[in-house]
Image (cartoon, helix red, strand yellow):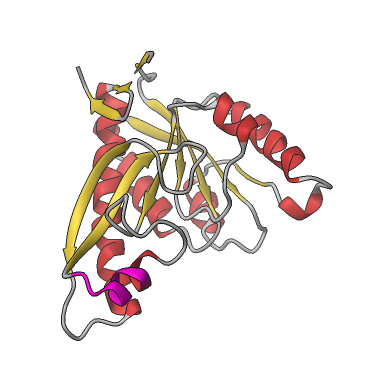
Amino acid sequence: MTVQTFRPSSPARLVVLISGTGSNLAALLEAAADPGYGAQVVAVGADRHSATGLEHARAAGSPVFVERVGDYAERSAWDRALATQVAQFEPDLVVSAGFMKLLGPAFLTAFAGRTVNTHPALSPAFPGMHGPRDALDYGVKVTGCTLFVVDDGVDTGAILDQRAVEVAADDDVESLHERIKIAERSMLVEQVGRMAREGWIIDGRTVRVGG
């Protein structure tokens, strides 16, 4: 299997994709305001005009764009259009930060090894849309969050980092998910910064940040 080595620009160029309030985007923008972080958000994209997180981008002076699936006759056409939009900003890394659409073959080919996403569970457990709910239903005592390199599966990509979150006896889905989100933001900001400053290597399912 081919070993992929990625050495970003300095500062690294980030394109962030969102669908909602953009809390992870806000954390990345705040971190990137420090020159020592080693990355800049060069654009923010969304799949809907109503994504309120776009206001974080506008306030920070980052260019924004919207590509709606419903504007295209086929999902594959949307995927190609999204890839074209993102490519215009020449990103070193694409961060899916609460982006609620699966990326398709055109996008994953264009940005293979350079797209990361988070999942609110400890992969490979509880993939899909309802990680915190599924963890509670299963009765686990520890769950958490995962940062991974996006592939063509559902939360199946090579793992960059994971953080554990204990499940409290009185947790419901909302309370558990809120604590996972806190761990997720911290993990995302820390690891994206390291990737920007140090680069990363993908060897099969092993991802190493730095040399």
Where residue 132 appears, x then y in whole percent?
A: 34, 69
Image quarter where the N terminus lies is: top left
Query: In the image, is 107 to the left or to the right of 116?
Result: right
Q: In the depicted view, which residue is nearer to us: 178 or 152?
A: 152
What percent of the width, then of the height, locates residue 42?
A: 50, 34
Residue 133, quarter of the rendered image: bottom left
* Number of marks drawn: 0
The outermost residue toward the front is 138
Quarter of the image containing the C terminus?
A: top left
Looking at the image, residue 28 lies above or below residue 121: above
- Residue 118 lies, in percent from the top left, at 37, 50
Magenta span main SS: helix
Q: Residue at x 23, y 48 (%)?
A: 162
Q: Position of residue 54 (x, y in %)?
A: 55, 55
User: Image point 37% across, 54% down: which residue?
Assistant: 119
Q: Compared to 32, does 108 lie above or below?
A: above
Viewer-nearest residue: 120 or 123: 123
Query: Is residue 144 part of the magenta span, yes or no?
Result: no
Quadrant in which residue 199 is drawn: top left
Picture quarter containing residue 201? top left
| Residue at x-position 20% and y-position 86% | 170
Give the vertical position of 179 relative to 192 (above or below).
below
Q: Residue reaching furthest bottom?
A: 170
Residue sitting at x 31%, y 56%: 125
In the displayed structure, does residue 76 sit left or right of residue 152?
Answer: right
Give the magenta range.
134-140
Q: Which is more toward the observer, 52 or 153?
A: 153
